[in-house]
Amino acid sequence: MERIFWVECRQCHGNFYCDYTLRNAGLQLICPFCKEKFLPEEAASLDERWR
Amino acid sequence: MAKDLRAFLDELRRLGQDELVEVNKPVRPAQFDVTAVLEHLTLEKRFPTLLFCRPEDLHGQPSRFPIVTNMFATRARCARALGLPPERDKMELSLAYADIERHRVPTVTIPQSEAPVRESVLAGNAADLAILPIVRHFEMDLGPVLTMATIMRDPDEGFYDVTFIKTFYKDQPRRAGLTIHSPHHLRIMKTYEQRGEPAPVVNVLGHHPAFFLGSLALAPWATNDYEVIGAFLGEPLRLTGSETWGEDFLVPADSEIIVEGVIPPGEKEICDPFGEVTRTYQPQGLKQAFNVTAITHRHNGIMQDVFSGHEEHWYLGSIPKEGSMFNSLQRQHGCIKAVHLPNSGVARFTAYISIKKEREGIAKRVGMSALLESWQFNWAVLVDEDVDVFDEQEVLWAIYTYTDPSRDVDVLKNQYNIFHSAAGNQKIIIDATKPLDTVSPAKIQVPAAAMERIKLSDFGL
């Protein structure tokens, strides 16, 4: 099971999650609800808790 | 006539609305209309094949392609697709599958001019994915996704590999993303990538259900899957030259719709989330890009889809695996009675195995072997031969009655599974067999002689 992180879209505030390899890859995520593209650090919020 | 999807739909049509429902009301597949209908039916425990005759395409226009879905949603229908008795839909079906997958039927190649799938050929800019009524399945899905089988050809050994791969529409006419996770497809793709060459991929969006069931056989590397599929069809699979590569890449001639394209070396696309077989979403990630080169189809080609994370998705996993797993475990241990991958474990995580237990400790040995049968397994549950592994209530009864958590549950840590669940990278064996090294209560039963003597019909029941 690979690590994931949750993202809150900066535009529509929809929540979705990504493989952790995208966290610091310098790639724009795509919001599945509004198609907004943004870097993880531009998200309205991130939830990276993992155990 | 060669076997195709239409012939099978005709067979289902004759059987009535339990098997095939034709929907003439217009639907918007990209707006969840199709999956909402399917979910309602599932909640009512109704599992017909659905033929949506008037879907919209991704341009919002009436599509020329109807959608068929939920084809594999009952084991009985899967049995029927393989020409087997539908009432023998449990272990007998899985064993029959395992028997068929050992056979090979050579293919036949027909001229392009005779191939039904080439009745219409769209190449170049005309090959627009948005003309298809691609289904968006679940709320958090990145977008509409094609869910059927893809074909790759090994550039060195020349064999064809067929498996199920998701194709993500990327809001461009000829661009998509592919989420390849099957080992053979990955290996072929990496060979092309190492050479810096585009990898040809063909997407088959409709064929006889035996084609797709056969594509899931656990065939070893370098097997020509076209010949395996022929065994499942019970006749040679008809092939023809593709639009893009001609005779260098043969495609199934009786497909409904084919999308041809290439994976450009090194190019990636953001794909997922997608509501997966696990009933959770695969996380967003970076996957292979796919450039469409041609779409060919039959007149009124029918686009097939799988209702992922539901019955048909699970049976596509359990039926092929149960039989091969039974044979493998039986060869090793000789005491196996039945194997079932239950829908509660999404037909991927969990195996229920019944054994004829003759000594203490054998259940765990079988459990260890079972967990090696698939990297997707997390749980192996062992029960006695008198427990029907296809009846989950019986299996759970055995766990709650016979499993001593301090002795009968083992956890193997630091394993691997790509799917997300709390068990994650652990493998768990639950021995729910009746212990032989201590006394324990007996299972209740009405005497067999009384059951034989008494008939419900004698009591007006």
Image (spheres, helix red, strand yellow):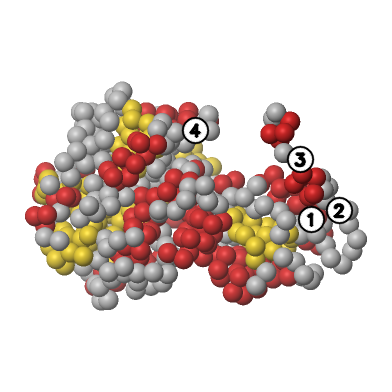
User: Which residue shows up at 70% across the image and 50% down it?
Assistant: B395
The answer to whether residue B198 is left or right of residue B280 is: left
Q: Compare marks 4 and 1 and give the one earlier in the sequence.
A: 4
Q: Are marks 4 and 1 on the same chain?
A: yes
Mark 3 — on which chain does it sit?
Answer: B
Q: Position of residue B49 (x, y in %)?
A: 39, 37
Q: Amino acid at mark 4?
A: Arg
Callout 4 touching callout 1 (CB < 8 Å): no
Front-lying residue, A18 or A23 = A18
Q: Compare marks 1 and 3 and give the one earlier in the sequence.
A: 1
Q: Compare marks 1 and 2 and give the one earlier in the sequence.
A: 1
**For residue B326, what is the image quadrant?**
bottom right
Front-lying residue, B217 or A13 = B217
Mark 2 — on which chain does it sit?
Answer: B
10 Å crowding of disc 1: few (<14), some (14-19), many (20+): many
Q: Is residue B395 above or below residue B69?
A: below
Q: CA distance from mark 4 to mark 1?
A: 35 Å
10 Å crowding of disc 3: few (<14), some (14-19), many (20+): few
Mark 1 — on which chain does it sit?
Answer: B
Residue tagged 1: B403
Residue tagged 4: B46
